[in-house]
Amino acid sequence: MNVTVPMPNLSLVVPEILMVILACGLLLVDLFIPKDRKRVVGYIALAGVVVVGVVTAAFWGKMAQPATTFSGTFVLDRFALFFKEVFLFTTGITILISLKYLEIEKVSLGEYYALMLFCTLGMMIMVSGADLIVIYLGIETMALSVYVLAGFMKFDHKCTEAALKYFLLGVFISGILLYGITLIYAATGSTQLAQVAAVIKEKGLAKNPLLVLAMFMLAAGLGLEIAMAPFHFWAPDVYEGAPTPITAFISVAPKAAAFAALVRIFYHGIQLLEPQWQILLWIICAVTMTIGNVTALMQQNVKRMLAYSSVAHAGYILLGVLAANQVGVQGIAFYFFAYAFMNMGAFGLVIYLRRENIVGDDIDDFKGLAQTHPLLAVIMVVFLLSLAGIPPTAGFVGKFLLFAAAIKAGFYWLVALAALNSVVALFYYFRIAKAMYMQSPEPLPQLSPGRGLVLALVVVGVFTLFFGIYPQPLMSLAKDTAHTFMMFLS
C-alpha cells in the first residue's frame, strides 16, 4: 500500500528557519573571532534579529486568515506574528544591553548570543503551536537555553545557584505539564487543539474529571514561566542571581510566550471548560497580584523588587485572560509590548550603574542620581511611572485596556483589587525615585556605559512615552491581532 506524506508549507516557517540558520551560523562564526572581539558576534546576532523581524512583519498583510502547516499542528496568524515581534524586539534590546555588560563581567562569549537566539526560536514555536506537543517542544527549546543563560557567569555562586534552582523547578513543572497533556490525550484521543475542542463539544466532556485535572496541570506548567502564584518562588532568586541582561530578558519574553500559549490552549483547545478555568484563574489572579506587590514592599535589592513586580504584573495580565473577550486579547497584546519597553528600560538602568565592584542593583546605588545624571533620573522615572500605570505612559494604556476588558466581563471586584494593588505598587516604585531626587549622592567611580546600552535606553524610553501619548498605532495592531484571533475561535 502506498502512503502519501503531505509536503508541509515551509513558507509559513521561514522566520523559524532563518532563526535556526542564524543561531547555528553564530556558533561557527564564533570559532574564528578572537576572544577580545566577541562583541562582533553580538553585532551579527543583532543584525540577524532585525532581518528576521522584518521578514516576520512581511507576513502581516497576508494573515487576515490563519494558515496551518505540518498537518495542522503549526499555525501562523496575526496573534502569533504579534508575539513573535515582541520576542524579537526583546531579544534585540537584550543584545544591545549585553555588549558592554559581558565585557565588564569578563564573560564575553559568542555562545551567549547563540543561546539567546535558540531561546527565541523556542518561543516562536510556542506561539505558533496548534498542538500541545508542538507547544511543549517550544517550551523545552526555550527553557533549556534559559537555564544555561541564567547560570552563564559560572564563577559567581549566586548565578550558579539561580540557574540550579530554575532548572530543578523547571524540570519538575515540565513533568506536570507533560502529564496534563497525557490526560488530555487520554480523554479526547488527540493533542491537536482544534480536534480536542471538537471532541469535547461532540461528546459533552466539559465536566470530565480528567480534563479538569489536565486543566490544572497545564496552568501549573505554564505558570512557572508566567511566574504566577504559587509558582513564583523561583523568580526573586533567579532575577537577582542571573546576569542582569538575562534577568531583563526572562522578565519579558518567556512570560509573553507562556501567556500566549495559555491563551491559545484555553481559548482554542479547552474553551468549553471556561466556567472551571475562570474560577481557577480568578483565584490565581487575585493572589498573584497581591503577593507580588506586598512582597515587593520589603525589598531593598532592585532586581528582587522588579522580580516581585513582575509577579504582580502577571496578575494584571491574567485579567485579560479571564475576560475571554476581544478587548482582553487586545489588552494582553498591547501590554506585553509596553511591558517590554518599561521593564527592559528599568533593568537597563541597573546595568548602567554597574561599575568596578558595584553591581548597581541596590536602591542606595540610585542615591542622588538626579544631581549627578539628571537625564538618567528622568528616564528612570518614566519607566517607574509606566510600571505603576500612570499616564502619559504606555503602561497606563495597557493597564486601562486590561481593566476595561475585565469590567466588560463582569469582574468588578477583581478590578477593584487590581486598582488597590496599583496604589501599593506606587510606594515601592517611588522608593527609587526618592533615592534619586531626595538623597545626596555618594562619591563613586565614573559611569562608563557602552553605546549599545545608551541606544537601548533611548529606544525603550521614547517608545514608553510615545505609545502613552499616541497609542493608536500599537493599539490598532493589537486590535487586529485580537480580532483575527477571536474570529478564528468562532
Image (cartoon, helix red, strand yellow):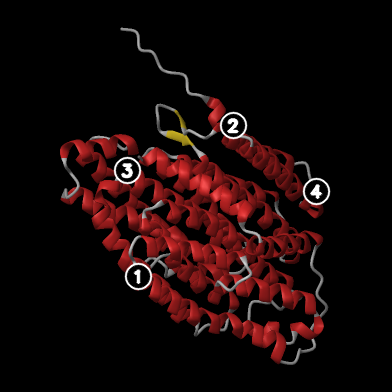
Q: Which three-letter amino acid code belongs to the residue tagged 3?
A: Gly
Labels 2 and 1: the sequence-earlier one: 2
Q: Is residue 208 above or below residue 57?
A: below
Instruction: Read off the residue under disc 1.
Output: 412
Give the Cα distance between marks 3 and 4. 50 Å
Give the Cα distance between marks 1 and 4. 59 Å
Q: Is residue 243 visible?
A: no
Q: Which three-letter amino acid code belongs to the residue tagged 2?
A: Val
Decide which of 145, 77 is in the foreground and name it: 77
- The local secondary structure at tag 3 comes to helix
Instruction: Read off the residue under disc 3.
Output: 269
Instruction: Read off the residue under disc 2.
Output: 14
**Of the two numbered discs 1 and 3 in the rendering, the one whose residue sits closer to the viewer:** 1
Instruction: Read off the residue under disc 4.
Output: 34
Labels 3 and 4: the sequence-earlier one: 4
Q: Does the residue at mark 3 contact the one at mark 4 (Cβ under 8 Å)?
A: no
Q: Does the residue at mark 2 contact the one at mark 1 (Cβ under 8 Å)?
A: no
> Residue 429 at what x, y percent from top left?
58, 79
**Of the two numbered discs 3 and 4 in the rendering, the one whose residue sits closer to the viewer:** 3
- The local secondary structure at tag 1 comes to helix
> Residue 319 at what x, y percent from top left?
40, 63
Give the Cα distance between marks 2 and 3. 26 Å
